[in-house]
Amino acid sequence: MIKTLAKSIREYKLSTILTLVFIVGEVCIEVFIPFITADLVNSIKASASIEEVVKTGLFLVLLAILSLTCGGIAGFTCAKASAGFAKNLRHDMFVKIQDYSFKNIDKFSSTSLVTRLTTDITNVQMSYMMIIRTAVRAPMMFVFAIIMAYIMGGSLATTFVVVVPILIFGLLMVAHKAMPAFRRVFKKYDRLNESIEENVRGMRVVKGFSREDYEIQKFNNAADEITKDFTKAERIVGLNTPIMQFCMYFNMIFILIVGSCLAITSGGTTVDIGQISAMLTYGMQILMSLMMVSMIYVMITMSFESMKRIYEVLVEEPSLKDCENPVYEVKDGSVVFENVCFKYSEKAKKSALQNINLKIESGMTVGIIGGTGSSKSSLVQLIPRLYDVTEGSVKVAGIDVRNYDVKTLRDSVAMVLQKNQLFSGTVRENLCWGKEDASDEEIEEVCRLSQAKEFIDTLPDKYDTYIEQGGANVSGGQKQRLCIARALLKRPKILILDDSTSAVDTKTDALIRKGFKEFIPETTKIIIAQRIASVEDADMIIVMDNGNISAIGKHDELLKTSDIYREVYEQQINGGDNSEEA
């Protein structure tokens, strides 16, 4: 795990090494200063000349400046290294997620991935900062200070034999008790983020049902759970301070009382004032070093869970991979399903699709009708290989989709979903997702064919009008037409519309389908719809039922042979189909 995460350090290795070098310099100087100070105190006691005092004092000032300089440079390089490491780690995770299939994303959930990219990386960044600075400084300071304390204090340094084990034991117990609470927090962060995401995405539904109080309570419950765990952990960690103060004051009292007695009884031959002064300083350095080590232990243990969560994302292998010699050309839009069965999960007891056999010629217009849960979307998602079949094969242009280069295949297939996504940016920028170098004429043509040009011309800045995140400032019907235009601009071999005209009226729907025939006659068009009117003129209509193909034929044939199709048709005819634009 450490080796995998360390790969993200890359260009910040130099900053990391410089941090370690300057920290070593800072520690060496800091440990040496009390030694010189003790010598100066003893010199003053021995009636040293003013020149010697000034000379030693200036030397101490120089050492302090050097220590400060080393510490300042180490702080700068440490910040650069840790922030850079976090940046690279975030980049590597984001790039990895782009290669994920829907199956991989389903495994983690979008809210968990967001938490891992934000909170978890921040925790790891803080740990890395402490590791390359404090985790080096504290142990070195502890060891050097112990050595210098025995050199300076001799038998007086035995105080540390009592104090240090007490402090170490106390700090380890504190960290051990606090860790379980810290570990529980991260999964609860996922639930909190999930609550926020659901609420923001479903704000219209929340307000429509006046469920604000319920959502607030749900959020408060998730926040309270995190607060309880953090409060418990922080309460335990808060014991660090009294333990530290106890050891520090015990050390000071012991050195002052025992040291003073030895200095008085021996007349300064065994221990003198300078040594007592140095011992107090070294004692503080030793105890502060242990305190830092305990905080490092707490931080690293807390972030260990974050490291594992990040590691899981980085080592997760995409369930969809290119074969050894992939095909880089899709010749036409013909599609063949051969004995296809599909499960969303290996653990699933029931298949979403069962024994699907289907042949679609290139350029055909195919309609798919079926009730909710009949696996219409599951069927078409296998064509651009958003999922892989569990059994059988799906072929495009006579070649199994698993033998294509994934990017090549998906560049040849355009999907327009009922809830398709618009991104923050201008109308033009959103449309150019279909073709980056599209000219103004091409953009206007596809917008005219998708019936989007009319409303775009009414926008304040037309094609340069800014679209809010998720298309919040356009209606459902406008959003769908923009997504259809984006797909048309791609000029795909296969165009899949998954109930993507549900938010437009029947007249606009008919005009869009007319535009398809004119603009992309050779493209295979697969239209999933709830309205019979959207597919009745299709070359082939597929009726789905509970993961199976119930019937295939044209409109007139299905009215005679398919009970499901006829029932849907009669309901819509008798009930009327006056869908309006959302």
Image (tube, rainbow, N blue to C red):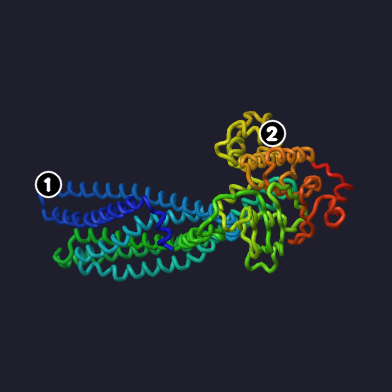
In the image: residue 184, left or right of residue 284: right
The circle on residue 448 is 2
Residue highlighted by disc 1: 50
Mark 2 secondary-structure assignment: helix
Side of 563 relative to 96 (left or right): right
Count the marks.
2
At mark 1, the secondary structure is helix
- Seen from the viewer's position, the closer of residues 409 and 22 is 409
Q: In the orientation shown, which residue stands out farthest toward the right?
A: 574
Image position, residue 406 (x, y; %) = 56, 53
Residue for point 76% across, 61% down = 546
Of discs 1 and 2, which sits in the foreground? Answer: 2
Q: Quadrant of the C terminus?
A: top right
Nearer to the camera, 137 or 544: 544
Q: Of marks 1 and 2, which one's residue comes earlier in the chain?
A: 1
On the image, which quarter does residue 162 sit in? bottom left
Q: Nearer the viewer, residue 151 or 159?
A: 151
Residue 140 vs 58, above or below: the answer is below
Q: Quadrant of the N terminus?
A: bottom left
Real-space Cα separation, disc 1 to disc 2, in angstroms: 94 Å
Name the residue rendered at 44%, 56% in the picture: 124
**Residue 582 visible:** no
Q: Name the kind of residue labelled 2 in the image.
A: Arg
The answer to whether residue 468 is left or right of residue 505 is: left
Name the residue rendered at 29%, 54% in the picture: 23
Crowd class of label 2 (few under 14; some 14 to 19; many from 20; radius 10 Å): some
Residue 570 in the image: x percent, y percent? 88, 51
At label 1, which amino acid type do we have?
Answer: Ile
